[in-house]
Amino acid sequence: MYSIYKEYYQNTQFSIFEHDFAKKQGAIVIFHPETHEIVGFSTVDIQHFEYQHKKYTVLFSGDTVIQKEFWGAKVLHRTMLKLVIKLRIRYMRDEFYWLLISKGYKTYLLLANNYYVYYPHVDGKYQELVPIVEKYCKEFFTEYFDEQTGLLNFGTDYQPLKTDVAPITEEMRLINPNIAFFEEKNPTWQLGTELPCIGRIAWSDLIRYPFRFINKVLHAQRFESLKKVRSLSEE
């Protein structure tokens, strides 16, 4: 796992990786379908706290790394969904959220593309989630949370993405507002600062999720059809 991690991140040290991993409750591990070698993973932790007389359960995602040739694979999404459903049942009466810290736009897009109610949102929605994020960061990342910027700053322990892993181009900013928004919220992401993000996991959200998945499939099919039509017209 560490060999994959250091392939994509700078300033890595096995001791830091091992120490951080030991604090997590587990990891979702992705294996190669033929060789069964590890090709990716996402560390996870389940944390609890109280805020304004309510109990909160948070599924926290830590380091998430997938080898480039497997980007776009849905194994992680499916496994995460199964875990979310199990936890939603186990902590049925708690407020339940997914919380992640994002040092790259791809992680942020996992939130923006799959959740209905989340923060930060490109349209400025769901500001009511801000105090929950701040409460979480103050409790679990006390010494690293910068209230002025809303970012986590790990100082000399920074482990930023390598510059060629997931760069942001001007074209990407123009095509996808969420990518431009991520960079606006975390302008120092290339240095390794992390943007705390939160997504609500209510029963109503889980019920709607299959419809979102179906819409994505239909959209992809329409996109492929348009590409074929365009290709034929150019011949």
Image: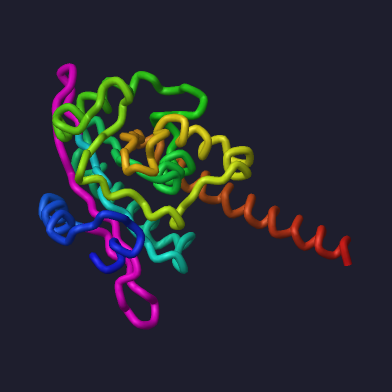
Q: Is residue 104 left or right of residue 168?
A: left
- At horizontal 16% and vertical 39% (from top left) the residue drawn is 47
Does residue 30 belong to the magenta stretch? yes
Position of residue 166 measured from the top left corner of the image (x, y, whole percent): 46, 52
Quarter residue 139 falls in: top left
Position of residue 210 measured from the top left corner of the image (x, y, whole percent): 48, 48
Quarter residue 155 falls in: top left
* Placement of the C terminus among the 4 image quadrants: bottom right
- At horizontal 31% and vertical 39% (from top left) the residue drawn is 194
Residue farthest toward the top in the current orientation of the protein: 52
Q: Disc count in the image?
A: 0
Does residue 119 belong to the magenta stretch? no
User: Mainly helix, strand or loop, the magenta region?
Assistant: strand
* Towards the viewer: 48 or 105: 105
Quarter residue 193 falls in: top left
Regarding residue 207, the answer to whether it shows in the image is no
* Towards the viewer: 68 or 227: 68
* Placement of the N terminus among the 4 image quadrants: bottom left
Q: Is residue 19 left or right of residue 33?
A: left
**Which residues are drawn in magenta?**
27-56
Please say if 23 is above or below 96: below
* Towards the viewer: 222 or 25: 25
- At horizontal 32% and vertical 54% (from top left) the residue drawn is 64
Q: Is residue 82 left or right of residue 215?
A: left
- At horizontal 17% and vertical 21% (from top left) the residue drawn is 51
